[in-house]
Amino acid sequence: MSEQAKQPILSVRDVKVHFQVKGDGRWPWSAKRTLKAVDGVSFDLYAGETLGVVGESGCGKSTLSRAILNLIPATAGEIVWMGKDLTRGTDKDWHAVRKDIQMIFQDPLASLNPRMTIAQIIGEPLRVHKPELSAEDIMQRVRSMMRKVGLREQMINRYPHEFSGGQCQRIGIARALILEPKLIICDEPVSALDVSIQAQIINLLKELQREMGLALIFIAHDLAVVKHISDRILVMYLGREMELAQKHALYDAPAHPYTRALLSAIPIPDPKQEKGKVIQILQGDLPSPINPPSGCVFRTRCPQAADRCSKETIQLRRISAQSQSSCLLA
């Protein structure tokens, strides 16, 4: 890592996002309970780096991404951007930061306004954050960004419903990049696309990252997809961190039983290897974040759980030069 990259551009420190919900939802007087969507997540992100975030549905990946952008307020913890703590920032502070942190959403078509043309959609961030630009300057930048993400300029006056899913995602990428941000949060940007289109979008993001020096947070279910774009990977389960490791360390020697179970589910292209592969099937259902298990939240489904796992809870601890794990037995 270069000298310039040794200082993180984003530091997330013990961030929690809790929601108050009614006890059983049947009666207005039901006692409220706390749903712990994110329950103490910490990591650093460096310029030009890609952090993959993986886990089952409901583990808090998307909630974490929205808390980083303050689309959902964090209940506790710190979000430090370029040395400034934004958790106590004002609306003015956040407005100044928005142009540096952008987001690509999961559903490419639903994230675009159907009543706006592509020119209006891609150019909107410039009109909000750079009002000094003329209409001609905005159109020039929109055309340039369309070429950069692989869209033809002749499409500039079309509406979102006239595009395929992959093209809509390219429009979303262009909108996120038009302000030349330092960080883009990709919230499952390829999960709604065909496999061949997924590869095109991932390759496009990697190319744009090299060209513009972007940092990425790439959220996905699929560890096979995350492997091709990430430098480090954060594994989440029930709102907590299970493992944080360099890509090769995580795939070659996973330290947490949950990570090993996720990796065992990745298909192998070789039919012979796939046939002989042992898949670690997790028993039971994902516990409720309203009433999580005591101790290690994964213990109720862990094949290696011991008595101490129900009594002790630990944060990520370093177990090698490239890997951290929250497993007591690692």
Image: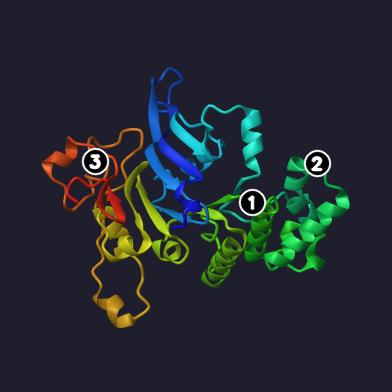
Q: At 24% across and 54% down in the image, what residue appears?
A: 257
For disc 1, the marked residue is 110
Sequence order check: which comes first, mark 1 or mark 2? Answer: 1
Asked whether the beta carbons under mark 1 and mark 2 sit within 8 Å of each other, the answer is no
Callout 3 amino acid: Cys
Residue 131 - label: 2
Callout 2 amino acid: Pro
The answer to whether any part of residue 171 appears in the image is yes
> What kind of element bears circle 2?
loop
For disc 3, the marked residue is 296
Q: At 51% across and 70% down in the image, what residue appears?
A: 195
Callout 1 amino acid: Ala
Sequence order check: which comes first, mark 3 or mark 2? Answer: 2
Apparent side of residue 123 relative to residue 278 in the rendered image (left or right): right
Viewer-closest of 195 and 81: 81
Q: Measured from the top left, where is residue 133 in percent x and y?
A: 83, 46
